Amino acid sequence: MSNVIDKLTEYFRKFPGIGPRQAKRFVYSLLTSSDTYRKELSALILELKNDIAVCQSCFRFFAVNGSGRNLCPICADPNRDNSTLLIVMRDVDLENLEKSHVYHGKYFVLGGGVPILAESPEKNVRTKELLEIIKKMTALKEIVMAMSLTAEGENTEEYLRKILAGAQSERKIKLSTLGRGLSTGTELEYSDTETLKSAFQNRH
């Protein structure tokens, strides 16, 4: 029968990019931390759902901070460019691109990627929601697919091209991808500002 250490290790292993050794180190780190630290961590985890909402436009997580729970600050900003939509796989990709200050349009977070040989790709990403948002963006002229240059990222881009083909032809919307600057195998969330600027400026 699993003890608390084993159970916690399994929970930490479910985090993206965390292997069994790292997960076990997290558990032992908690064991050596103070009671105050563990209590504060537990309280913050429980508060996540109360203080964090999902934007109804870009579908990123954002801190409410007393404002409305429907739109995040980026989507609620009237100065953002409504003619461009940049699609990313995860929230961390959006945050990294936003920090680079190279892009000033709207975003859409897919909520993940499409694995190779996935039988039902629409179950992995927000396909329906994406098409609905595009339909509402009447001034949209360009969609930028900002995927990581990994096998999953490339497969996701290929899938997006298929589902966006109709909107592209009917409304003459340009489909582009990030250009030079990103190396093959690069995760978008780990790219530095200058690399992202180069990749965005050389999109094609």
Image (spheres, rainbow, N blue to C red):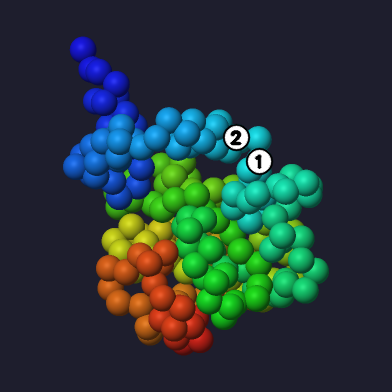
Pointer 1 with pointer 2, Cβ within 8 A: yes
Say which residue label 2 marks.
47
Question: Does residue 118 appear to the left or right of 62 in the view shown?
Answer: left
The picture places residue 65, in percent across and down from the top left corner, at 72, 48
Q: Is residue 159 visible?
A: yes
**Of residues 200 and 102, the one drawn nearer to the viewer in this rendering:** 102
Three-letter amino acid code at the position of disc 1: Asp
**Of residues 169 and 19, the one drawn nearer to the viewer in this rendering:** 19
Q: Residues within 10 Å of mark 1 (few under 14, many from 20)?
A: some
The picture places residue 106, in percent across and down from the top left corner, at 65, 67
**Which numbered disc covers residue 51?**
1
The picture places residue 63, in percent across and down from the top left corner, at 65, 49
Rendered position, 35 above or below 145: above
The picture places residue 125, in percent across and down from the top left corner, at 48, 48
Find the distance from the CA under tag 1 to the CA under tag 2.
6 Å
Rendered position, 87 above or below 56: below
Circle 2 — which element?
Answer: helix
Name the residue: 39% across, 52% down. Answer: 114
Name the residue: 55% across, 32% down. Answer: 43
Three-letter amino acid code at the position of disc 2: Glu
Q: Is residue 59 visible?
A: no
**Image quadrant occupied by the N terminus:** top left
Q: Quadrant of residue 81?
A: bottom right
